[in-house]
Image: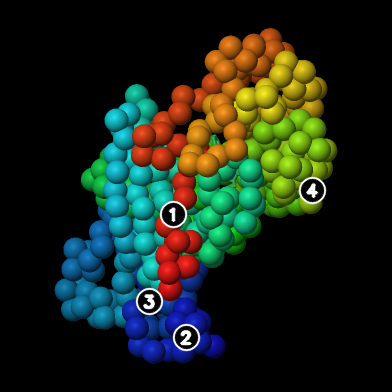
Amino acid sequence: MSITEELHNGTNDGSQIDLVGLSRSEMEAVFDEIGLPRFRVKQVWHWIYHHGVREFSEMTTIAKELQPKLAAGFMISRPGVTTEKTSTDGTRKWLLNFSDGKMAETVHIPEEDRGAVCISSQVGCTLTCKFCHTGTQRMVRNLSSAEIVGQFMLARDSYRAWPSSKEPRQLTNVVMMGMGEPLYNYENVAKALRIITDEEGINISRRRITLSTAGVAPLIPKVGKELGVQLAISLHAVHDDLRDEIVPINKKYPIAELLDACRSYPKAKNSRRITFEYVMLKGVNDTPADARELVRLIRGIPAKINLIPFNPWPGAPYDCSTNDDIAVFAGIINRAGYSSPVRTPRGRDILAACGQLKTASERERKHI
Ligand code: SAH
């Protein structure tokens, strides 16, 4: 099968091929097939990912006669936006709709001198972590590489932050911490991250990209070897019996196995510490004994512990720990030599904070 047919799912129906989300070598193969020389890939790639253009007619280094030919065969997509909301603290959330009507959310979290785009990897999530709103939504599907990289591009569009060389300060970091488990959609996430880090395009450095996993231990070495991005682990409990209950993937990959994978994560040195996320649940995982056990567990791993005050959502079965309990917990970790910032919740008023993302996809499915 030719690459063009493959990209049309085996039936070349003549519809346009989306260039967004193709790897460089795929784009080369597609252009080869229609007889375009390699340097065209370089040019088009630069227009799409450096300048952020969406029309071939804006690609001024491409011959005028060639532009309409490209436009007839290809498109440069973005996810559709159903709603865009901005929180009182500046956090922005987009509810996206994809070509099949499925939905997911992207969040932008601005800070003083930088900003992170929090990207979803799946529509919904299969992990059913008990404190997470997304986990109460039925998993619908994996996002494609175009849909993943498209979320970042959309944020750039929204802040008029093209071209990439402007070094837009609002969009310096990427966190794979939106809806879904990125390591259950490894191939598409990897492809999207390779595009995001490509130096002739978006060019975000690997150290400014964090991939968060609830603990798909066997894939962690691959992330280190193939992607080399910063790793975050959603730990949340220090005993297997509790973690089995609140992060059920623990039954498959228990704490010891997960931490072994972290120990051998390459480049885990001070500049590339592993982040452990720990949601503070009142009366569940927030005692001083838990904090001491956490310190014991991660001994030997260059780490930072993000304490996340539990973000409530309608019907959630937990409360957030008290400020005093969080401070005591943080103090114990801190005295053991680890940085343990308490994350200020962002965008709570628009349900954009950690664990609050949930789209109407499920409800809509039921209505069909
Ligand atoms: N599936 C991946 C990516 C999602 S990251 C993972 O679990 O790491 C989203 C982060 O928000 C995770 O650390 C998750 O555990 C945390 N989180 C989920 N629900 C939360 C809530 N209600 N309050 C605070 N943090 C929450």
**Three-letter amino acid code at disc 2?**
Glu
Residue that badge 3 annotates: 17
Residue that badge 1 annotates: 359
Report, in whole angstroms, how far the alpha carbon at label 4 lies from the one at label 3: 41 Å
Residue that badge 4 annotates: 251
In terms of depth relative to the viewer, which is nearer, 154 or 90? Answer: 90
Up/down of 192 relative to 90, above or below: below
Q: Is residue 161 visible?
A: no
Report, in whole angstroms, how far the alpha carbon at label 4 lies from the one at label 2: 41 Å
Q: Earlier in the sequence, mark 2 or mark 1?
A: 2
Which residue occupies the extreme front position in the image? 315
Left or right: 339, with 191 as reference point: right
Q: Quadrant of residue 90?
A: top left
User: Is the CB of mark 3 within 8 Å of ligand 1?
Assistant: no
- Bin the neighbour count of mark 3 within 10 Å (Cα to Cα): few under 14, some 14-19, many 20 and up: some
SS assignment at label 4: helix
SS assignment at label 2: helix
Name which residue lies at 63% across and 50% down.
128
Name which residue lies at 69% across and 43% down.
247
User: Which is more foreground, mark 2 or mark 1?
Assistant: 1
SS assignment at label 3: strand
Using the image, tell me which numbered label, if any, was put on residue 5.
2
User: Which is more foreground, mark 3 or mark 1?
Assistant: 1
Up/down of 143 relative to 88, above or below: below
Q: Quadrant of residue 295?
A: top right
- Bin the neighbour count of mark 4 within 10 Å (Cα to Cα): few under 14, some 14-19, many 20 and up: few
Q: Quadrant of ligand 1?
A: top right
Name which residue lies at 45% across and 37% down.
353
User: Which is more foreground, mark 4 or mark 2?
Assistant: 4
